[in-house]
Amino acid sequence: MTHPVGTLAIAALALLMPLAVVAADAPAAAPFSLPTLPYAEDALLPAIDADTMRIHHGRHHKAYVDNLNGKVGQFPALATQSLEQIQSGISAFDTAVRNNAGGHYNHSLFWTLMAPVGQGGEPSAALAAAIDERFGSMDRFRTGFAEAAGRVFGSGWAWLVVTPEGSLAITTTANQDNPLMDVVAERGEPVLALDVWEHAYYLKYQNQRAAYVQAWWPVVNWSEANRRFQAARAGDQAD
């Protein structure tokens, strides 16, 4: 005679077995995720309004993340590389990966390079000296950077980078390309990045990109830029 407790235990195990099979067969977690903003959506006022931040981060950036995760099945190597490694070998992937991996990297960086007014610090002595040496003064650098951002036709980004030779350069890229990619003409390690896609500023500034660029300077996170500059220079010296 079968013990009733044993019968119940066997029945319970039988019910759980399909769940175990489903769990074993479930796809791995998506390797890319939307980073949390390091400040409130309205923290960058008056430069960037809360509605723009909400849409830019929660819709545009999220779309890049979702689309990139959607390409992992076609390109499994994406799940085994860092976001930076993907950029440097972007030529191995298709245009959709280039656009969405670039969009994810660029925006993830962009959020960190801004801070509420009065909380972003100042350029370090080393970065300020490098800017003066390369551009003549901070004012001339800002003018040159703003002019470069204004010349981007359509959508793209403006950058301050440390070049492979160790000097500073102002560069621009189209769409969601960036200076880490092995397909761009001017490569380097980003120190500053400015998104000049219209979705970054149109709600507040409409077609006045120059006004957006001018308003952006007070929310630059120079503390993060200093860290990136120091790391890039250290990497050049190690090479």
Image (spheres, rainbow, N blue to C red):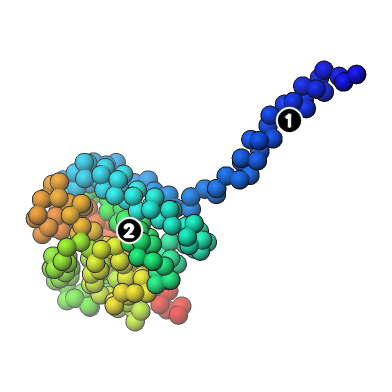
2 or 1: tag closer to the N-terminus: 1
Q: From the top left corner, tell me how far across and down residue 22 is, in percent.
A: 61, 40
Q: Residues within 10 Å of mark 1 (few under 14, many from 20)?
A: few
Residue type at mark 1 is: Leu
Numbered badge on residue 13: 1
Q: Is residue 4 visible?
A: yes
Q: Which class describes the residues within 10 Å of circle 2: few (<14), some (14-19), or many (20+)?
A: many
Q: Quadrant of the N terminus?
A: top right
Q: Is residue 188 visible?
A: no
Image coordinates of residue 131 in percent, x first then y, are: 23, 72
Label for residue 5?
A: none
Instruction: Work out how far the residue at label 2 is from the one at label 1, CA to CA, in angstroms.
Output: 47 Å
Residue at image coords 34%, 82% = 165
Question: In this figure, which residue is indicated by the disc labeled 2?
Answer: 103
Of residues 15 and 177, the one drawn nearer to the viewer in this rendering: 15
Left or right, residue 205 beside residue 3? left
Residue sticking out furthest to the front: 1
